[in-house]
Amino acid sequence: MEDEIIPGVPTVDCYFDPACPYAWITSRWLLEVERRRPLRLRFKIMSLSVLNEHRDIEPWYREFNDRAWGPARVCAAAEQRHGGGVLRDLYTALGTRIHLARDKDYDRVIAAALAATGLPADLADAARTDEFDAALRRSHQAGQDAVGEDSGTPLTVVDGTGHFGPVLTAIPGGDDATALFDAVRTLARLDAFAELKRSRNALDPASLDPASLDSAPLDRASLNSAAPDRA
């Protein structure tokens, strides 16, 4: 239910970078909420590569950002050529391979994801060109503007109010998923709310339990062509 506006139904824009495990967790949480109640959920692209391209960051994170251009560029190309509605399934197809199958061969991931979603194989060419970078940067900037400052991923916009987060280390399910959404929506309505933090000790991507990244049957089902080699 991405395009239809229904009074009383919240609108949520989920800005994602396909390579980010925390964006993946937040996006799967929102899909769980959508399965349990009406929600106008739209997927949009942001880019850690754009965000960090001029920053002084650690070598391992620079390598991560340099490689992350590929999947994000392919998403931008798909959106430009086929419309924003293709991003939901394309992101799921990419994410199941990157985050669940732990396949870091992005050329292979992209090719398999395009095949799984029925999108043209030549969209993979966008990973190695800047042809769609202007569109990627526009989408990225729209997310930043919604928050009001430079922000990483995940980035969510709830009923027009943007936030960095929520940053989660596992996917809430059932009543926990909807309770968290109600809390986020409540905070989004409060003009006085500015920030809420807790310890970041659990936010090491390498320490994430693979089981924490998987909650939805639709994600596992889309692994039909995931590669066996995982990095």
Image (tube, helix red, strand yellow):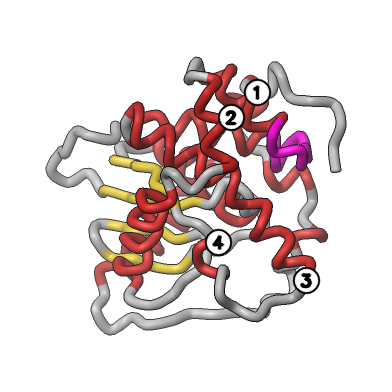
Q: Which residues are magenta?
A: 97-107
Q: Quadrant of residue 92?
A: top right
Residue 152: % across, % down? 52, 67
- The residue that mark 2 highlights is 93
Q: Secondary structure at mark 1?
A: helix
Residue at image coords 28%, 65%: 161
Depth order, front residue of 215/62 = 62
- The residue that mark 3 highlights is 59
Is residue 60 found left or right of 118 in the rendered image? right
State how far apart marks 1 and 4 are (Cα).
Answer: 23 Å
Q: Residues within 10 Å of mark 4 (few under 14, many from 20)?
A: many
Q: Residues within 10 Å of mark 3 (few under 14, many from 20)?
A: few
Q: Secondary structure at mark 4?
A: helix
Q: Are marks 1 and 2 in contact (CB under 8 Å)?
A: yes
> Mark 1 belongs to which amino acid?
Ala
State how far apart marks 3 and 4 are (Cα).
Answer: 15 Å
Magenta includes 99?
Answer: yes
> Mark 2 belongs to which amino acid?
Ala
